[in-house]
Image: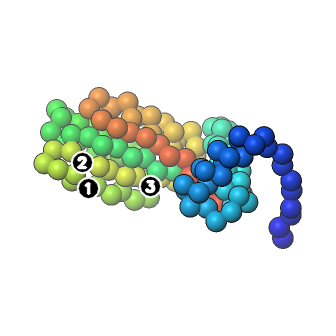
Amino acid sequence: MLNRIGISLDEELLKQFDALIAQRGYSNRSEAVRDMIREELIKKEWSDTDSEKTQVGVAIMVYDHDAHDLSHKLTHLQHDSHDLIISTTHVHMDESNCLEVLLLRGKAKEIASLGNAITSTNGVKMGKLVPATTGERL
């Protein structure tokens, strides 16, 4: 069941919002607002790092596989957290750079810890943890 609500926005903010949703391809304002609300609810889910609830996330990293001992370190990090890793994808971007994506499921605190460990590993050129949701609470 859908409920209707009303919001008031000043003209300039509405103009910027309409430009943003057009750029992103939304068919209407309601769909854009629903997505923004969902995004905030996902942040709230993840903010309770002591929660026992199962969360999901995606860890992304780009690194030079020729960097001294880096592949070995990253492999050990993954093996140490094998219970969190659902799947991995490894792509050779060029002759030295690799892109790796890890799909993760577990407690938010444990997923965040792995994401931080990957991102802070010396030699990782780009690392990011993207919190996601199981969808149960949305």
Is residue 53 visible in this depiction of the protein? no
Foreground of the two, 104 or 35: 35
Q: Earlier in the sequence, mark 2 or mark 1?
A: 1
Instruction: Give residue 86's position: percent from left, percent from top.
Output: 44, 58
**Gap in angstroms between the C-alphas marked 1 and 3:** 15 Å
Residue 133 placement (x, y as % from top left): 60, 55
Mark number for residue 98? 2
Q: Nearer the viewer, mark 2 or mark 3?
A: 2
The amino acid marked with disc number 1 is Val
Name the quadrant containing residue 4.
bottom right
Q: Residues within 10 Å of mark 3 (few under 14, many from 20)?
A: some
The residue sitting at 35% across, 43% down in the picture is: 61
Q: Amino acid at mark 3?
A: Leu
Q: Which residue is mark 3?
A: 103
What x and y, as percent, mark residue 127? Answer: 38, 39
* CA distance separating discs 2 and 1: 6 Å
Mark 1: few, some, or many residues within 10 Å (few <14, many ≥20)?
A: few
Q: Which residue does the image show at 17% across and 50% down from the upper left?
A: 94
- Regarding residue 119, the answer to whether it shows in the image is yes
Q: SS at mark 3?
A: strand
Q: Amino acid at mark 2?
A: Cys
Circle 1 is placed at which residue position? Answer: 91
Q: Quadrant of the N terminus?
A: bottom right
Q: Is there CB contact under 8 Å for labels 1 and 3?
A: no
Q: Earlier in the sequence, mark 2 or mark 3?
A: 2
Disc marking residue 127: none
